[in-house]
Every structure is written in C-alpha cells, then in structure tokens.
Image (tube, rainbow, N blue to C red):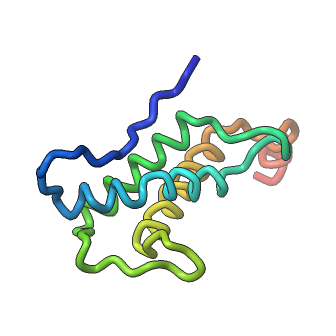
C-alpha cells in the first residue's frame, strides 16, 4: 500500500500564492520530518506510521493557521529552518496524540487488584 502525500510545487503560471500556501510549500516536507523524528517507534529499525505522521502534520497546520499564522510573523526556530510556531504546534499535536494513546491502553495486570485493596 502506498501513501499519498500532498506535495507542494510551483507551477510556471503567474498565479500568486497566499501567505499560507507559501508557508505550506516552503515547510511541508520539513514539518513531516520534524514530526516523524519525534514519534516513538518499536525499535531503531522501524519508522513511525506514515499515516499518523500525515494526520499529525495536518493537525499542526490546522492549529497554526487557525491561530493566525501567516508569512509576516514567521521566525526560524533555533538550529532549524522550520518556524518556531510550527514546531510548537507540532509538539502540541504529538503530545495530544501520545496522551490519547496512553489513555486508551489497558492498565497492566494486577493494577486493578492493588487499587481495590487500597479502597
């Protein structure tokens, strides 16, 4: 199964792009990589689920754009070409995902027995 990723490219037409489109074309691949590099994996040979990376990237853009992100206030982050505002939104998306994932995991065996004895 292949994964389709939206890729940005500039056509040779004279179309003018909005500041949000410019940001997307400039930073989409960096943002995908930023998120993929920060997701936990089973072992060092595996990679995160590409669908999850894309979902979290979409969530990041949505959060950043709804927060008023535009090309005029974008400053590169430390040691990165990726804007700090996108890195912050990505970290938030990853945190929310991991929190949901932990909440959905069943408790280890024996935890319920210990909790019931304490009550």
- Across and down, in percent, residue 115 comes to 78, 48
Name the residue located 24 percent from the left edge and 69 percent from the top edge: 70
- Across and down, in percent, residue 113 comes to 84, 40
Q: Is residue 114 above or below residue 60?
A: above
Q: Quadrant of residue 49?
A: top right
Q: Is residue 69 above or below residue 43?
A: below
Tell how many labels.
0
Given residues 49 and 114, the one toward you in this image is: 49
Given residues 112 and 100, the one toward you in this image is: 100
- Across and down, in percent, residue 54 comes to 48, 41
Residue 1 appears left or right of 4? right
**For the N terminus, which image quadrant?**
top right
- Across and down, in percent, residue 110 comes to 87, 39
Name the residue located 40 percent from the left edge and 50 percent from the top edge: 59
Residue 116 appears left or right of 33? right
Name the residue located 39 percent from the left edge and 46 percent from the top edge: 58
> Furthest residue to the top?
1
Residue 106 appears left or right of 78? right
Given residues 90 and 110, the one toward you in this image is: 90
Given residues 47 and 115, the one toward you in this image is: 47
Name the residue located 85 percent from the left edge and 36 percent from the top edge: 109
């Amino acid at each position: 199964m292949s994964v389709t990723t939206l890729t940005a490219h500039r056509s040779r037409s004279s179309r003018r792009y909005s500041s949000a489109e410019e940001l997307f074309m400039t930073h989409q691949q960096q943002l995908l990589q930023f998120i993929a590099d920060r997701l936990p994996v089973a072992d060092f040979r595996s990679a995160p689920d590409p669908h999850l990376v894309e979902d979290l990237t979409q969530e990041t853009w949505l959060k950043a754009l709804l927060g008023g992100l535009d090309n005029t206030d974008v400053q590169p982050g430390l040691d990165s070409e990726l804007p700090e505002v996108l890195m912050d939104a990505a970290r938030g998306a990853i945190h929310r995902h991991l929190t949901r994932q932990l909440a959905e995991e069943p408790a280890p065996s024996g935890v319920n027995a210990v909790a019931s004895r304490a009550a």
